[in-house]
């Protein structure tokens, strides 16, 4: 079961990572991740957990970790961390 879940996670991160281009919002990346996960028969582990509103964390530039996705538009040259 862990191997299967890990395979879905890897594929999801590759899918969302390929979408992370200038002009897309972190919220759009989050929606794509949720759709991908559900389309593969899984469910987002942390969405709704203790009120967390998203499927992924998307931290841009100086944000350390666990940024909440939203309307933030990615710009050319920015650093994005997804977990």
Image: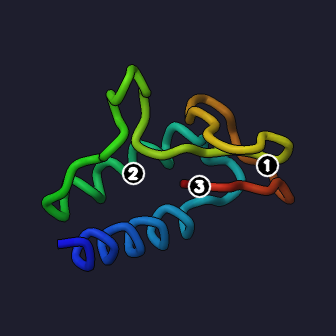
Say which label, 2 or 3, has the lower sequence index. Answer: 2
Q: Residue at x 61, y 45 (%)?
A: 58
Q: Position of residue 7 (x, y in %)?
A: 31, 77
Say which label, 2 or 1, has the lower sequence index. Answer: 2
Q: Work out how far the residue at label 2 is from the one at label 3, CA to CA, in angstroms.
A: 13 Å
Secondary structure type for disc 2: helix
Judged by depth in the image, the label closer to the viewer, 2 or 3, is: 3
Secondary structure type for disc 3: strand
Q: Is residue 12 above or below residue 79?
A: below
Q: Residue at x 82, y 56 (%)?
A: 76
- Position of 33 with respect to 81 (left or right) is left
Say if mark 2 contacts mark 1, CB within 8 Å. Answer: no
Q: Residue at x 64, y 37 (%)?
A: 67
Q: Is residue 73 above or below residue 79?
A: above
For residue 37, which quarter of the picture? bottom left
Q: Work out how far the residue at label 3 is from the one at label 1, CA to CA, in angstroms.
A: 16 Å
Other-residue count near label 2 (Cα within 10 Å), few / some / many at <14 / 14–19 / ≥20? some
Total numbered labels = 3
Q: Is residue 6 above or below residue 73?
A: below
Q: Work out how far the residue at label 2 is from the one at label 1, CA to CA, in angstroms.
A: 19 Å
Residue 32 is labelled as 2
Q: Residue at x 57, y 32 (%)?
A: 68
As drawn, the residue found furthest toward the left would be 41
Q: Position of residue 73 (x, y in %)?
A: 69, 39
As drawn, the residue found furthest toward the top would be 51
Residue 75 is labelled as 1
Residue 82 is labelled as 3
Q: Position of residue 77 (x, y in %)?
A: 86, 59
Q: Is residue 20 above or below residue 56?
A: below
Secondary structure type for disc 1: loop
């Amino acid at each position: 079961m862990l191997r299967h879940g890990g395979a879905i996670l890897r594929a999801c991160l590759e899918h969302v990572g390929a979408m992370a281009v200038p002009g897309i919002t972190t919220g759009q990346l989050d929606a794509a991740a949720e759709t991908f996960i559900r389309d593969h028969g899984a469910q987002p582990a942390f969405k709704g957990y203790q009120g967390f509103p998203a499927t992924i964390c998307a931290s841009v530039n100086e944000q350390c970790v666990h940024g909440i996705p939203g309307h933030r538009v990615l710009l050319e040259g920015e650093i994005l961390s997804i977990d």
